[in-house]
Image (cartoon, rainbow, N blue to C red):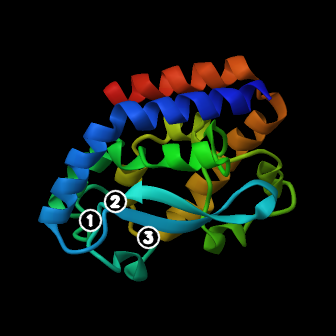
Amino acid sequence: MVKRLFDIFFSLLGIIILLPVFIVISFFIVIDSKGGIFYKQERIGKNAQPFKLYKFRTMYSNSDKKGLLTVGFKDNRITRIGYFLRKYKIDELPQLINVFIGNMSFVGPRPEVEKYVKLYNETQRKVFNVKPGITDWASIKYVHENEILAASNNPEKTYIEEIMPAKLLLNLDYVHKNSFFTDIKIMLLTLKAIIK
């Protein structure tokens, strides 16, 4: 209950405070390339239920049809403003809407697309016992995930066989040991990682 009240209050506060920033970002996205301001993608959330996750659009329209993974910051599907938004994780800010609505929390396992969720084993599916979040332990450890994938000869294989299982182990640990104070710690460490 405390976590949900925290999520509602601070997501609404964040949306109100950042509204002028959202407007400026929206303007640059529109003049930089054709397409909408937001990118909506179906992800799998608590109890394995699908929901629409919101991000600022950082790629040219229909780029996800060429693959779901982003391979480094030099992925030619990324727009000019998209490079900047991704570098500082600004593209994730619209997920404050998801937090306010209630299908996400500030902290929790990052929600995955169905394609990769289908590969989860029974133990890994326990991550669906909690709400997904904007950040988690895996987001901190793999803050440079795009660069790791860019250095791979087979990015999708690297993601499925190495990165995804490692992330899920961290997420399962969170599911078993999560607390409000752990969430605060994760949020502070996430800010530190972004600043670095």
Residue position for label 2 = 150
In which quadrant will I find the N terminus?
top right
Kindly check if marks 3 and 2 are in contact, taking CB atoms under 8 A apart as contact. Answer: no
Kindly check if marks 1 and 2 are in contact, taking CB atoms under 8 A apart as contact. Answer: yes
In which quadrant will I find the C terminus?
top left
Residue 171 at x, y percent in the picture:
70, 42
- Which numbered marker is on residue 154? 3
Query: Disc 3 and disc 2: Cα gap in Å?
Result: 9 Å
Give whichever of 30, 12 is nearer the camera: 12
Q: Earlier in the sequence, mark 1 or mark 2?
A: 1
- Residue at the left extreme of this rendering: 31
Give whichever of 53, 179 is nearer the camera: 53
Query: Disc 1 and disc 2: Cα gap in Å?
Result: 9 Å
Q: Indicate which label's residue lies in the foreground, 1 or 2.
A: 1
Q: Decide if residue 196 is in sight here.
A: no
Q: Identity of the amino acid at label 2?
A: Ala
Query: Disc 1 and disc 3: Cα gap in Å?
Result: 14 Å
Q: Residue at x 75, y 64 (%)?
A: 49
Mark 2 element type: helix
Give whichever of 94, 82 is nearer the camera: 94
Q: Identity of the amino acid at label 1?
A: Asp
Q: Residue at x 78, y 45 (%)?
A: 130
Q: Residues within 10 Å of mark 2 (few under 14, many from 20)?
A: some
Q: Indicate which label's residue lies in the foreground, 1 or 3.
A: 1
Residue 128 at x, y percent in the picture:
78, 53
Q: Residues within 10 Å of mark 3 (few under 14, many from 20)?
A: few
Q: Earlier in the sequence, mark 1 or mark 3?
A: 1
- Which numbered marker is on residue 61? none
Relative to 32, residue 85 above or below: above
Mark 1 element type: loop
Residue 101 at x, y percent in the picture:
62, 49
Residue 152 at x, y percent in the picture:
39, 62
